[in-house]
Image (cartoon, rainbow, N blue to C red):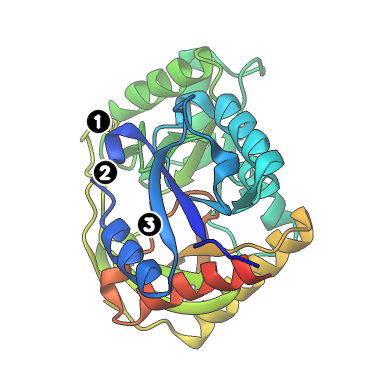
Amino acid sequence: MTTHARRIAVATCRDAWRADEDAPLLAEALAAAGIDAVEEIWDDPAVDWAAYDMVVIRSTWDYALRRDEFVAWADRVAAATELRNPAALVRWNTDKRYLAELAADGVPVAPTEFLLPGGSVTEPAALADRLTEVVGRTSGFVVKPTVSAGSKDTVRYAALDEDPGGLATAAAQAAELLGADRPVMVQPYLAAVDTEGETGLVFLGGRFSHAFRKGPLLEVGGGPVTELYALEAISPRTATEAQRDVAERVLAAARARTGVQELYARVDLLPDEDGTPVLLELELTEPSFFLSTDAGAAARAAGAIVAALDA
């Protein structure tokens, strides 16, 4: 009886081939665990996904304009071998309208308004009125597509009292996205982004691993992010009990919604005006883990993958 060395594919995209800072740390930890990890481009038709014991989605950051193609790819890979996270999570998590479902489940979510293509409000003039209704005149806000990665096509606007002209720009952005058949989301810009920053909580193998702080990404009037991803200011952080409690509630709700246990997750939180942690985003598809912010994180990520292979 013979055994073969276990091989996994780490799915990435062409522009992220060497941009994923987690990749070398994860590869080293997997090698130490006896796993041969090979980077593969997710949309490369020459890749034989069935040749791998598992495919782990990592830096597939260019899928936003091709979500249907990406979801179909996930289904094909899942039919050929183990895919993590599973295709059901990919389908659910790659459109941020999942936030409305989690809010309906009682999870504390940052206030979010969704605008849909083909709806009654799609023209710039009507969108300007709708945006004023949604965000008021005293709060800064963010407009972005519901399918995006790395803050791409995301714009921060000042409060309308401070910059009335920004309303026309925001309405034009929303109209352009809707005209391209891309649903739009509008969120208030919570002041804590600029002071406390976001807290990202990383879960590996269903267990909390580590947390990090993400500094503010967007400047007022900075225009949409057009690169593959926005550069981020990341530093270590210790998660509070309240943050961990909210993150656990988020994941429990996601598991109940999808019926699927995730291999990895990242829960991005921010305090609201009362200091209560609220969900900005749940990353179950291609999140950076920022492994360098915790000395044991890479080993835990590799251990979670090994445990999934063993299962």
- Which of label 3 and label 2 is nearer to you? 3
* Distance of label 3 from label 1 (alpha carbons): 24 Å
Q: Is residue 311 left or right of residue 172?
A: right
Measuring 42% from the left and 59% from the top, which residue is drawn there? 36
Tell me the SS state at disc 3.
loop
Q: Is residue 212 above or below residue 153?
A: below
Going from N to C along the chain, the mark reached first, 3 or 2, is 2
Label 2 is placed on what type of residue?
Ala
In this orientation, which residue lies closer to the viewer: 87 or 287? Answer: 87
Residue sticking out furthest to the front:
1
Measuring 66% from the left and 64% from the top, which residue is drawn there? 107
Measuring 53% from the left and 23% from the top, which residue is drawn there? 182
Q: Which residue is mark 1?
A: 223
Q: Which residue is mark 3?
A: 288
Q: Is residue 218 above or below residue 71?
A: below
Tell me the SS state at disc 1.
loop
In this orientation, which residue lies closer to the viewer: 209 or 234? Answer: 209
Q: Which residue is mark 2?
A: 230
Q: Residues within 10 Å of mark 1 (few under 14, many from 20)?
A: some
Going from N to C along the chain, the mark reached first, 3 or 1, is 1
